[in-house]
Amino acid sequence: MILGTHSNKLERWLGPTAEQISLSMKDWYGPPIAVAGVPGNVWAHKGGDFRGIIRSGQYLNGIDYATLRLKKIAKKFARSQMSQANAGFASLSDLILEATTGKSRYYQYNKVGPTGVVQVTSSLWRVGPSPPVGATPAAAPGGTVFDDASTGGFPFTNPASGDTQHFVRADNQASVAGNTLLLYDLLFGVAKTMASTSTEAVTGVPTRYTSTTATDMDYIGGNFGFIQVGGTALAATAHNWTVCLYTDQANASSTMPSLTGNASAIVDRLDHPVNQWYCPLESGDVGIKAWTQMQCSASVATGVIWFMLGHPIAFMPIPIANMVCIIDGIMTAFNLVRIFDNACLAFLEVTKPSTTATTYTGQFQTVAG
């Protein structure tokens, strides 16, 4: 049995982002999600509990640690300049290259996020500049199966046969404090016909995380649906998403419990209630294999809605503004989480702490082995 995480230490380390993640997991149905960047091995569980060991937070929080780390770097750099002629970091880069035998890859990103709503999740799929604005999902019934070749995804070369690709590190920076990014694999999307209360069939099926065997790496468990406002805000019409059907982890047809939408929902937000970044599922279900039907309770005259499917990789808290927050994918809860071949990696801003549009910059690293 995995013990609960020391709550005082976790709150001291992450600040308000700890509560945001906890609230966002209140009704979660899938397996635990890694909370990256926390020293130790901490995972967010359904019900909002955290489990695993935290090895910091007793005396220092994330800001204290980052400040001390910068001071140490400055001292070390000053000492090295007294004995080296502008050596820079070439030897460290060479060491990393040798340690990974040429199988390490780096991906840079710069996302200028949208204006948000407090305690509501926003998608960064439709914003750029790097990667560029993501592709618009095709209309029903077919929709779009996303992969690394899709516009908006991070293009990467799949590892050689027999190897698998894993996350090892990320360096994230945000212009606003207290935000949390969810890194996820975008599997599928389909555009909903608006101004209609009719049921609308969906036939497209994702190509990753499709196994019905719970022990398989690509098990459906954890696949989540979300309903995103596309490039046009919704009209001021009260509505619910109801009689929406999906195929569950047992290949059985299930009905999504009614989800309350939002009149005049702004672009890029999820058309969900507060603190909810995933669509609810039938009792006992742990993931969505595919959407099969969409329906809205009211005729919303204008707006764009996309039904999306994703699989979570990890929460990446960024508690400090304008300072690089280092995510260690080896010694924290990432524990070399696998990235599947052809993955379409994307970000959600989970339960934003303020309405302020946030700019994110950084890079992450994967290694194949």
Image (cartoon, rainbow, N blue to C red):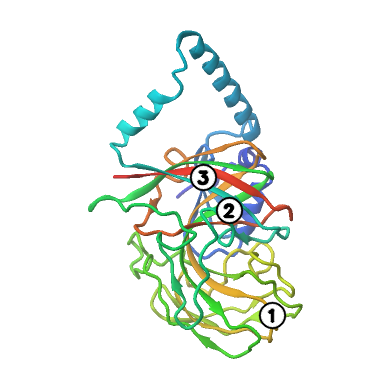
Which of the 4 quarters of the picture holds residue 318?
top right
Mark 2, residue position: 49
Which residue of the protein is positioned furthest toward the left in this rendering? 161
Check disc 3 and report its element: helix, strand or loop. loop
Q: Determine the residue positioned at 55% across, 14% down.
A: 78
Q: Are marks 2 and 1 in contact (CB under 8 Å)?
A: no
Q: Determine the residue positioned at 46% across, 58% down.
A: 153
Left or right position of 156 against 189: left
Check disc 2 and report its element: helix, strand or loop. loop
Name the amino acid type tagged 1. Answer: Thr
Q: Which of 150 and 197 lies nearest the eye of the viewer?
A: 150
Name the amino acid type tagged 2. Answer: Asp
Mark 3, residue position: 36
Left or right position of 182 against 219: right
Mark 1, residue position: 302
Q: Is residue 317 above or below residue 243?
A: above
Q: Position of residue 90 (x, y in %)?
A: 40, 25
Please identify the quadrant where the C terminus is shown: top left
Q: Is residue 128 above or below residue 62?
A: below
Circle 3 packing at 10 Å, graded few (<14), some (14-19), many (20+), is: many
